[in-house]
Amino acid sequence: MVKEKLSYRDSGVDIEEGARAVEMMKSHVKSTYSEDVLCDIGGFGGLFSLNLKGIENPVLVSGTDGVGTKLKLAFMAEKHDTVGIDLVGMCVNDILCQGARPLFFLDYLATGKLEAGKVSEIVGGIADGCNQAGMALIGGETAEMPGFYTEGEYDLAGFAVGIVDRDKIVDGRDIVDGDVLIGLPSSGIHSNGYSLVREIFLNRGNCDLNEYSESLGGTLGEVLLRPTRIYVKPVLDVLDKFKVKGMVHVTGGGFYENIPRVLPENMGAEITLGSWDVPEIFGEVKRMGNINEDEMYRTFNMGIGYILFVEPGIKKAVIESLEDMGECSYEIGKVRAGIDGVKLCQG
């Protein structure tokens, strides 16, 4: 039996620091609000009013994800203001693949010891990602769990909801032989493959994250922590103008696992190597890890974060439309009948 009087703080949970974190994050969260948000911070649930103008048969599309072991690099670099963008990007790019317009986002942050300033940085990044995606951050949870996480570490998870008209769902069923793959560039490694990245650069290479690299154009830490690109605005613009048959968010599993997810039976894809610029960081990963090409394309996005499938007759117009928005894009391959999965071809 404990004789002295104990408080929640004595067990490692600081309620006052939690309240301070909420106050510090309020401006970030409110920056994402639109007239459809009917709640304020601190309620038990997030309220969002559905605007169904122009949608005849609404379908909600949802997705959830985390940031993965990229967080380990954020801990080492003491940089916490961009991993929230990664969190939003991993969720919202997924639901975008079915043509969904993002509506709202919820986050979950768990840590061993809550630090209000750090939490505010993280949530600031989440709000930045939501603003890039045109969606509202309407709820979340910050959990302080002493003894559960290593000191200074935390985990992030998120949940995105979007909406699409049933007749405009993009699911790949109309893809045919000869259709073209248009790739949108990534900002780098995005948020998958970091267990291998850390093994190569940190565990085996003993690299300094703060050392500047001429070939990379920045420090290794800066390059590895570049946040995931959010493709919502350019892709929704394309969907308003053109018939897009299928879309792919290139994440874990790279080209080999993600592209077949949208292809009809007995259809494969030929990817033309050399048709886009592969960021130097992937060359460094390949060289230092002595990794073969197939494994690189099975693990990483290789500089292409998002793919659109369109018929050949409109490919030029789609690329030009993206260019008008300031978006670079590439014709990276074609759909081929009778090919099993993905085949890499020299350009």
Image (cartoon, rainbow, N blue to C red):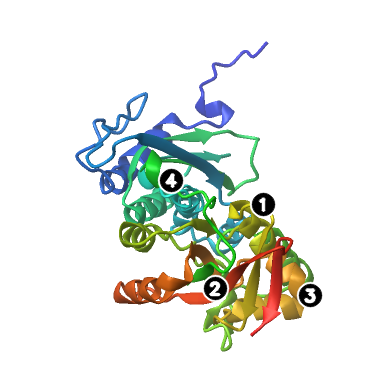
Can I make out residue 161 in this image? yes
- Report helix, strand or loop for mark 1: loop
- Report helix, strand or loop for mark 3: loop
Instruction: Residue at 65%, 35% (x, y): give it.
Output: 147
Q: Check the image and report above or below for 12 versus 121.
A: above
Seen from this angle, which residue lies furthest bottom? 214
Query: How far is disc 3 from disc 4 in space, using C-alphas?
Result: 37 Å
Q: Is residue 55 left or right of residue 302?
A: left
Q: Amino acid at mark 4?
A: Ile
| Mark 2 vs 4: CB contact within 8 A | no
Earlier in the chain: of badge 4 and badge 1, it is: 4
Q: Which mark is residue 343?
A: none
Earlier in the chain: of badge 3 and badge 1, it is: 1
Decide which of 327, 69 is in the foreground and name it. 327
Of discs 2 and 3, which sits in the foreground? 3
Earlier in the chain: of badge 3 and badge 4, it is: 4
Earlier in the chain: of badge 2 and badge 3, it is: 2
Query: How far is disc 4 from disc 1 in space, using C-alphas?
Result: 19 Å
Seen from this angle, which residue lies furthest left? 35
Q: Amino acid at mark 2?
A: Val
Can I make out residue 185 in this image? no
Earlier in the chain: of badge 2 and badge 1, it is: 2
Q: Which mark is residue 169?
A: 4
Q: Which mark is residue 223?
A: 2
- Rate crowding at label 2 as few (under 14), some (14 to 19) or many (20 or more) other CA atoms within 10 Å: some
Mark 3 highlights which residue?
292
| Mark 3 vs 4: CB contact within 8 A | no
Q: Amino acid at mark 1?
A: Glu
Earlier in the chain: of badge 2 and badge 4, it is: 4
Query: How far is disc 2 from disc 3 in space, using C-alphas?
Result: 22 Å
- Report helix, strand or loop for mark 2: helix
Q: Position of residue 131 (x, y in %)?
A: 32, 53
